[in-house]
Image (cartoon, rainbow, N blue to C red):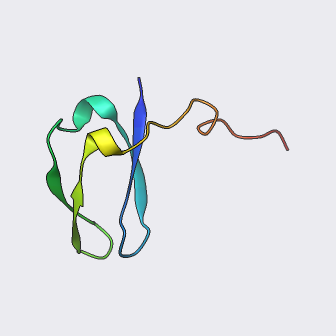
């Protein structure tokens, strides 16, 4: 399952969301942290690679 990171341009809060849960058309997103709204388009957001989800060994 591909994940997409949605980041608020106002406060930099981000959340990784499965791409299947996001609409294909542009939408107005609302940040749960700062409550600001911003435009989001799934097609413009690069999918996260599987490497970014893995942690590095300590």
Residue found at x 43% / y 40%: 46
Looking at the image, residue 54 sits to the left or right of residue 39; the answer is: right
Identify the image quadrant of residue 44. Answer: top left
Q: Residue furthest top?
A: 1
Q: Nearer the viewer, residue 52 or 58?
A: 52
Instruction: Check the image and report above or below for 50 versus 39.
Output: above
Name of the residue lying farthest toward the front: 44
27 w.r.t. 51: above or below: below
* Quarter residue 10 falls in: bottom left
Q: Residue 3's spot in the image, x, y percent?
A: 42, 35
Q: Is residue 29 left or right of residue 54?
A: left
Residue at image coords 77%, 40%:
56
Q: Which residue is drawn at the image coordinates 37% and 69% (left, top)?
A: 9
The C terminus is located in which quarter?
top right
Percent of width and height locating residue 19? 32, 33
Of 32 and 3, nearer the camera is 3
Tell how many labels.
0
Q: Quadrant of residue 34?
A: bottom left
Q: Quadrant of the N terminus?
A: top left
Q: Position of residue 24 (x, y in %)?
A: 18, 35
| Left or right of 56 on screen, residue 31 | left
Residue 23 % position (x, y): 17, 38
């Amino acid at each position: 399952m591909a994940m997409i990171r949605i980041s608020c341009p106002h406060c930099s809060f981000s959340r990784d969301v499965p791409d299947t849960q996001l609409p294909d058309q542009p939408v107005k997103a609302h940040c749960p942290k700062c409550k600001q709204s911003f435009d989001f388009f799934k097609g413009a957001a690069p999918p996260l690679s599987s490497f970014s989800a893995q942690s590095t060994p300590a």
